[in-house]
Amino acid sequence: MITVRNGMTVYKSATAVKRKAPTARLILFVAAVAFLWSPAARAAESATVTFSLDFPGSDPAHYSIAVRSDGRGRYECVGRISQDSDETENYSTEFMFSDATRARIFELAAQADYFSRPIDLRKKKLAFTGAKKLSYKDGQRETAADYNFSSVPAVQQLTALFQGAAATLEFGRRLTHYHRYQKLALDDELKRMELEARAGQLSELGAVKPVLQEIYDDGSVMNVVRARAQRIMEMGDAVPPR
């Protein structure tokens, strides 16, 4: 390569020119790494949306569901051990939300401004349906809002989604107990679960697949019960989440 500098001809080798190219690539690489370790990127990776409900006299009287941005979920509740018992238990389980549901939850949270504003529709004549709370937390902010009923569409959709998942997880809790201690109760419980699943009242059936699989694999359980558990598992695999 030939250049002219102060009236003099200067010769540069092609190798010297080419050595500049890696520098640009190095800058891009460093910039990408810096972004991945930026507070905004770390906040997005560690974000959590949580829904909780307290409703004395109902079963469960309290529960909460948390979902992280990587899809990991946790369900906690205080509920009766079985439908024919007044004894309660503290129960918790971890599971994975489906990718579609996880993405939808965070999309709706964004639409609701991450619950940074009041979301409760304060009308005296509204029936009490439980003290609800939606909260959002990441590396940069932590917000929450309480409500009984909300007119915000995104909040209404989140409420329905979380309540559908909670109903599924409650079936999982009771089925775990019945399979361990009261196998004759499995048939009625699975009948109700199948009916509610077909009516669209349950979501995230995959969250309770492990207990359904255990029931199906148990040769000491009646064949009709095992067949019902298999059908519900197949519904969870086939029906997309709401």
Image (cartoon, rainbow, N blue to C red):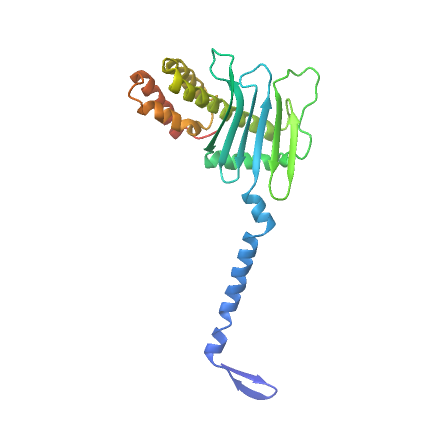
Q: Is residue 235 visible?
A: no
Give coordinates of residue 48: x percent, y percent.
56, 37
Where, by quadrant of the figure, is residue 154 drawn? top right
* Position above or below: 87 against 213: above
Residue pictured at 60% horizontal, 49% vertical? 39
Q: Is residue 69 visible?
A: yes
Q: How many marks?
A: 0
Image-based side of 143 in relation to 230, left or right: right
* Position above or below: 60 against 103: above
Give coordinates of residue 126: x percent, y percent.
66, 16
Residue pictured at 48% horizontal, 12% vertical? 85
Residue pictured at 56% horizontal, 44% vertical? 44
* Position above or below: 35 against 59: below
Image-based side of 120 in relation to 45, left or right: right
Give coordinates of residue 141: x percent, y percent.
64, 41
Specify the farthest residue to the bottom: 8
Specify the farthest residue to the top: 84
Where, by quadrant of the figure, is residue 132 drawn? top right
Give coordinates of residue 16: x percent, y percent.
49, 77
- Nearest the camera: 110 or 44? 44
